[in-house]
Image: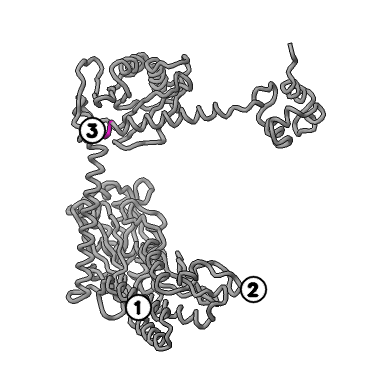
């Protein structure tokens, strides 16, 4: 604790407000407090901090405070400051997507059902939000099967009759564009769709059942059969839905899982008594923090964007002194009634337990995925180091390959893996300059010499970092040429070759090769580097070969550059027409003068020796 912090701690007031912890002028944490004096002092006078708080305190060089009149004011200010500064030690949700809605534009004479990313006050009816566009498209697909509404973008009504589309022919549309239904008939189906989306399945099926019986009584058996199929499909869809409560409710259910290092927050979305889906959010470094405070901060961050709180928020527990402020803040965000509930029993408690189960499952899957990723990257690099006798784990591994076609377009590639993962921005291409023809050994020698000389460039800005390990695609001979070039450039970096036949590893100065288990992550890492170097070299070689095959005859004319070639082709449209043009016609082309016209004319009419 420096003198600046000690002086400010003595002057802290007994007031609600926000505090901003800083490291060399940069804000690293924003917090709120009912009593700034007690809260801020606890960071510097206490010793039983969690690992996250202890790490943060060790970086603090200064702090500032902003006084507020009420706790709610401090909460709102904290949200704004976090959103503005994005401090490292605060919970920051990376998810900025807009959850989609189903939109029915009732201002149209024949409304359509569409997907919308935002809910606006435009007179349309919105249903949702749904958890991802896939969920919306699934619902829209059900609606298309159940209710024959149009999906086209025609502006109806149109003047003059139109031919019915395929949707009308297969019973997926009432055909309003061609006068096959009245506006009132169409609106009746729209009302059923809205009832369906509001969860009133029973009302829809009862209405359809009445129409089916009337159609059958009137001997309209095809219509009755279609209505019967609609009823069956709706009932089947209802059975697949998981009903949580009998009443139509709107709830967001929150829960948290912690593993001592990180945490995972889970949100379940309940609309009209049915779970529509859920989302999980990883919270790094929150594994040992107080779960109530973590959940409180998460909920605030979750609704800080354009998300609208549900009518009821369920969560397992929050700090008592701030839950009332959070509930008031949620009401303001919603623009209406919103209750914050910590259920102890019954269906609501079952929902929070279900959310906790999902949070634990998501955290376990994330940890398993991180473990697999570690084994494929850093773990594989560590295993490779052991296999070839390196003391340190190589962070930067470079792989090289040569590519040519019978000695033509001789090129090489350098790919870079950092911490076991590709770093494409570090990749480089080489064109072989010192010779022509097929000689992979000499090509590898040239490329490695050029690469390592860059490590010792006079200008520091042009220097390249030394790799920790180099992979040569080839056997002992290619490895020897590559190593000689590296040593001649003044570098000495661990290097090995990989022969393709048996995936043997060759080390400099060793006759015996090394065979690594084919199931080993280390071998898989080597193969990924080798394959990436080969792919990168082949891609570059093909691009050069393609450019060589696209040579234009006009490029052989002396004094005719790209601009004049383009002007000639735009004027005459073809090379044949250019060959047949007279001197006067050539002079008329933009950018051409007497000398350039003469050059083109002489090229087109070579003198006979």
Which mark is on residue 231?
Answer: 1
x%, y% of residue 226? 40, 77
> How far apart, in angstroms, are the residues tagged by discs 1 and 2?
35 Å
Which residue in the protein does label 2 denote?
160
Which residue in the protein does label 3 denote?
522
Q: Could you tell which of marks 1 and 2 lies nearer the N-terminus?
A: 2
Who is closer to the viewer here, 119 or 526? 526
Q: Quadrant of residue 497?
A: top left
> How far apart, in angstroms, are the residues tagged by discs 3 and 1?
58 Å
Task: Say few, some or many: other residues with alpha carbon within 10 Å of mark 1 (under 14 / 14 to 19 / 20 or more).
Answer: many
Q: Is residue 189 shown above or below 318?
A: below
Q: Could you tell which of marks 3 and 2 lies nearer the N-terminus?
A: 2
Which mark is on residue 528?
Answer: none
Who is closer to the viewer here, 314 or 432? 432
Magenta-tinted stretch = 521-526
Q: Residue lying furthest top in this view?
A: 609
């Amino acid at each position: 604790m420096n003198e600046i912090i000690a002086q400010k701690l003595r002057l802290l007031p007994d007031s609600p407000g926000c505090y901003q912890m800083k490291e060399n002028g940069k804000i690293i944490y924003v917090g709120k407090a009912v009593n700034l004096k007690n809260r801020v002092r606890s960071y510097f006078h206490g010793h039983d901090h969690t690992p996250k708080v202890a790490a943060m305190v060790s970086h603090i060089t200064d702090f500032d405070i902003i006084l507020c009149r009420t706790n709610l004011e401090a909460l709102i200010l904290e949200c704004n400051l976090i959103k503005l500064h994005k401090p490292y030690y605060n919970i920051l949700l990376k998810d900025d997507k807009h959850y989609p809605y189903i939109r029915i534009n009732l201002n149209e004479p024949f409304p359509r059902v569409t997907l919308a990313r935002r809910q606006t006050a435009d007179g349309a009816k919105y249903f949702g939000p749904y958890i991802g566009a896939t969920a919306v498209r699934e619902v829209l697909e059900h609606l298309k099967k159940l209710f024959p509404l149009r999906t086209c973008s025609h502006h109806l009504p149109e003047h003059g009759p139109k031919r019915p589309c395929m949707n009308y022919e297969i019973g997926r549309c009432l055909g309003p564009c061609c006068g096959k239904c009245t506006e009132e008939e169409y609106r009746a189906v729209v009302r059923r769709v809205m009832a369906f989306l509001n969860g009133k399945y029973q009302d829809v099926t009862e209405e359809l059942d009445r129409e089916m019986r009337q159609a059958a009584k009137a001997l309209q058996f095809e219509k009755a059969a279609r209505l019967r199929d609609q009823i069956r499909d709706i009932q089947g869809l209802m059975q697949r839905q998981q009903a949580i409560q009998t009443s139509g409710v709107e709830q967001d259910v929150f829960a948290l899982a912690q593993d001592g290092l990180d945490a995972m927050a889970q949100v379940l979305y309940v609309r009209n008594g049915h779970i529509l889906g859920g989302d999980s959010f990883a919270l790094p470094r929150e594994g040992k923090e107080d779960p109530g405070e973590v959940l409180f901060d998460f909920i605030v961050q979750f609704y800080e964007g354009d998300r609208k709180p549900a009518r009821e928020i369920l969560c397992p527990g929050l700090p008592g002194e701030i839950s009332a402020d959070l509930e008031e803040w949620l009401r303001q965000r919603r623009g209406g009634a919103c209750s914050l509930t910590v259920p102890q029993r019954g269906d609501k408690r079952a929902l929070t337990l279900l959310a906790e189960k999902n949070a634990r499952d998501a955290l376990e899957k994330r940890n398993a995925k991180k473990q697999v990723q570690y084994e494929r990257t850093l773990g594989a690099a560590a295993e490779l180091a052991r296999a070839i006798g390196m003391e340190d784990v190589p962070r930067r591994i470079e792989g090289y390959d040569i590519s040519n076609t019978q000695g033509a377009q001789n090129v090489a590639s350098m790919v870079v893996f950092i911490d076991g993962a590709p770093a494409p921005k570090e990749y480089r291409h080489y064109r072989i300059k010192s010779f022509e023809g097929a000689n992979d050994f000499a090509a590898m020698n040239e490329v490695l010499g050029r690469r390592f000389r860059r490590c010792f460039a006079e200008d520091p800005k042009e220097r390249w970092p030394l790799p920790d390990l180099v992979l040569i695609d080839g056997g002992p001979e290619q490895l020897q040429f590559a190593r000689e070039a590296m040593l001649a450039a003044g570098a000495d970096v661990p290097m090995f070759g990989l022969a393709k036949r048996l995936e043997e590893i060759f080390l400099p100065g060793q006759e015996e090769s090394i065979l690594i288990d084919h199931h080993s992550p280390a071998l898989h890492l080597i193969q990924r580097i080798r394959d990436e170097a080969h792919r990168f070299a082949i891609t570059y070689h093909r691009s050069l070969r393609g450019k060589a095959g696209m040579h234009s005859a006009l490029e052989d004319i002396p004094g005719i550059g790209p601009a004049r070639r383009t002007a000639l082709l735009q004027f005459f449209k073809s090379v044949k027409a250019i060959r047949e043009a007279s001197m006067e016609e050539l002079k008329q082309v933009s950018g051409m003068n007497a000398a350039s016209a003469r050059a083109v004319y002489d090229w087109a009419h070579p003198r006979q020796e």
